[in-house]
Amino acid sequence: MIVHCEERTVSPDRASVLAEVQVLLDARIAGSDRYGGAIRELWELAARRVGGGKLLRPILLLDTCAALRRAGQLGAEAPVGAADAAVVLRCAAALELLHFAFLLHDDVIDHDLVRRGEENLVGELHRRGSARGGTQRSLHWARSAGLLLGDQLLALVHQEVARLRVPERRRTMLLDLLDDAVAESAAGELLDVGLADGMIPPERTAVMTMTRSKTAAYSFELPLGMAAVLAGADSGTTDALRHAGRCAGTAFQLQDDLLSAFGDERLHGKDPWSDIREGKRTLLIEAARGTPAWPRIQEALGGQESGPRDGERLRMLLEQCGARARVEEEIRAQLAAARRALAPASSPVPAEVAQVIDQHLRRLEGRSR
């Protein structure tokens, strides 16, 4: 079956994930009536907005799990059973809801009202609320709603993973992976805020820890680890997949940092000057520290009125001082490390599985969104 989402034709796997996400959200919509119309409206808005991206995380889980099973029995345990397709699909849908929860929290923390070039959920609630009351009241309402909806989505994700029809040991492993990913992503986000606000010294170690933690843990390491558990992979294969995921996820976050500074806003959908206004201490900025351009770059960071002229000037400085080139080099190094973790000569990961994951890595190379 092929369905349409945001006027784009999507694959059967993508359609299945979106349908499963809708099942989970429909249940929440149906159960929200007892709290009043405002709560139902919030869940309905969430249902319309979730799944509008690339579905990177659920598709990575589905592709990897399928490849592991095609490769045959990998460990002492068999795959999850006769109903495994439904189990894996439910797990994939939970990953997309986890991503949406983190996006909501991120938008609240960063005071963003736009995502992918359009109003995000907080922005839409703010606009709707402005017609009912003052601007500041509606903004507070919208951000509170985004924060609390994100909390509820995190609870829903944990509930769904805990209810998967898998052996108890396997369920515990999945929950441990999920718990680690949530804890690490939250730590990475807090480091991000602490570095930007000057609460944490902007040392390279802290910047790299933040870069790895805020995205890699849940975007790549978690889907690959969950796929290994669901497919019954042995511990060596699971560890190798998680390590590859951590490296790939670090490269992914570094690419996001570059896109925020140098990318086309029409493609990646983020305000290109938001990182400047927020004074983000990414590796791109850290790479400029100690160069002759640093005093002028430091002066531009955190300027609340930063606009196109300031951004263009900062772009030029970051390029001329070599910061952009250093981050691009680090991205290549992280992708190479991911591939080494999957290389047949040194990895327990079956070649067929490594090839499938390498296809995902190739999509990261030179991405524009």
Image: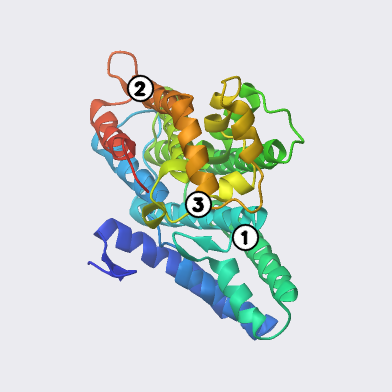
* Precedes in sequence: disc 2 or disc 3: 3
Tell me if 175 is positioned left or right of 254 in this view: right
Residue corresponding to mark 3 = 308
In the rendered image, the residue lying farthest to the right is 199
* Precedes in sequence: disc 2 or disc 1: 1
Q: Is residue 351 above or below residue 61?
A: above
* Precedes in sequence: disc 3 or disc 1: 1
- Residue type at mark 3? Pro
Spatial separation of the CA atoms under disc 2 and disc 1: 34 Å
Q: Is residue 64 above or below residue 351?
A: below
Residue corresponding to mark 1 = 150
- Residue type at mark 2? Ala
Give me the residue at 53% from left, 74% from top: 45
Give me the residue at 39% from left, 32% from top: 233
* Of residues 211 and 232, the one drawn nearer to the viewer in this rendering: 211
Determine the image quadrant of residue 247: top left
Which SS class for mark 2? helix
Residue 358, position as x, y percentages in the image: 28, 32
Spatial separation of the CA atoms under disc 2 and disc 3: 35 Å
Q: How many neighbours does mark 1 have within 10 angstroms: few (below 14), some (14-19), or many (20 or more)?
A: many
Of badges 3 and 1, the one in the foreground is 3
Tell me if 101 is positioned left or right of 325 in this view: right
Which dot marks residue 336? 2
Q: Is residue 289 above or below residue 175?
A: above
* Of residues 214 and 118, the one drawn nearer to the viewer in this rendering: 118
Q: Is residue 31 visible?
A: no
- Residue type at mark 1? Gly
Give me the residue at 68% from left, 86% from top: 132
Tell me if 156 is positioned left or right of 90 in this view: right
Of badges 2 and 1, the one in the foreground is 2
